[in-house]
Amino acid sequence: MTMRVLVLGAGATGGFYGGHLMMAGENVTFLVRPKRHAQLMENGLVVISPQGKITLPVQAVTRVNKPFDLVLLSCKAYDLDAAIETIRPAVGPDTRILPLLNGMNHLEKLDAAFGAERVMGGLCHLTITMDADGTIRHLHAFNRLTFGARHLVQAPVAEALAQAYAKCPITVVNSPDIVHEMWEKFYFLATLAGSTTLMRAPIGAILKAPDGLAFITGLLDECTRVATAAGHPPSAERDAESRYHLTMQDSTLSASMMRDIEKGGPTEGEHIVGDLLRRGRELGLELPLLTLSATHLRAYEARRTGS
């Protein structure tokens, strides 16, 4: 039996994962804005990937009025409040919601809006972008989708989703401890975003500064302390992986948040760096470098919005 899946948006991430669910035989509908609807009706969903090109005719709507089995949510954190209201008509008694947002704070908001029994956990590792004409470009062969049930009642949908994606060229993990998996990305991303936005440079350039290594490792240590105090200490493997990526000489790695700032756009700074700082302070931790990074992002937003 196929699932009736609603994907909010058909941008890079939503289009990629929603398109592959279509290829797996699921009944997928994209809920999109009028401009994107027109693109999809004219050109279909187009994904160019190292695994090949996908061109599919799609079901796309600009509003919904009936419940779905699963809602896939891949919006930016600063659009979450609007997204909640947009998907509300699609959420029925048996609907499950899979958010693929960074950070943790969105779980609290979605739980409050729809009930924790409906909200699964998820995250993805994917290098992807979308052209102005709507073409989605998957830039690197590696991609990993991790999700899981936060409550036992969600387990059947998580298993059905894993079976569907098993038919696709995607590395899929149906995690028995999805909240911990999300924390392991959270503390790493806060370090990456906090450092590259504050210094306005990729990791390799920061490391060329005399005190760059000390700054990055110091910030990483602070973020690790928050995760550990919150009950989610990174595994030895994840700690080694994080330190490798954040101390690699000549690395071009930077957070998309840095690129958002360079474009003068909104960021997920409060949702990532600010939220980790809030959690750490509530746990009684002193976090000077994380405070500096969060203050910088807050000052940027104040200047950008004129508030």
Image (spheres, helix red, strand yellow):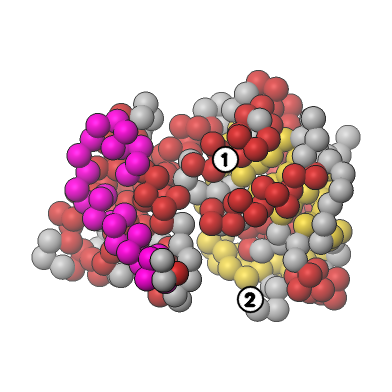
Q: Which residues are magenta?
A: 277-304
**Which quadrant is the N terminus positioned in?**
top right
Residue 174 horizontal/vertical position (percent): 61, 33
- Where residue 101 is drawn, which disc sits there? none
Residue shown at 77%/35% (left/top)?
Answer: 95
Which one is closest to the eye, mark 2 or mark 1? 1
In magenta segment, residue 301: yes
- Give the class, few, some or many, for how many residues have Cα within 10 Å of label 2's Cα (few <14, many ≥20): few
Residue 152 horizontal/vertical position (percent): 65, 21
Establish if 107 lies above or below 16. Answer: above
Establish if 6 lies above or below 258. Answer: above
Establish if 98 lies above or below 93. Answer: below
Residue 225 horizontal/vertical position (percent): 27, 36
Q: Amino acid at mark 1?
A: Lys
Q: Is residue 135 visible?
A: yes
- Using the image as rendered, state which of residue 261 and residue 5 is in the foreground: 261
Q: Left or right: 61 with respect to 257? A: right
Identify the residue position indicated by label 1 in the image: 109
Q: Is residue 228 visible?
A: no
Residue shown at 53%/32% (left/top)?
Answer: 178
Residue 141 position by quadrant: bottom right
Identify the residue position indicated by label 2 in the image: 131
Residue shown at 79%/70% (left/top)?
Answer: 34
Proximity of marks 2 and 1: CB atoms separated by less than 8 Å: no
Comes first in the chain, label 2 or label 1: 1
Q: Label 1, secondary structure: give it.
A: helix
- Give the class, few, some or many, for how many residues have Cα within 10 Å of label 1's Cα (few <14, many ≥20): some
Q: Amino acid at mark 2?
A: Asp
Q: Left or right: 147 with respect to 63? A: left
Q: Left or right: 48 with respect to 164? A: left
- Using the image as rendered, state which of residue 245 and residue 122 is in the foreground: 122
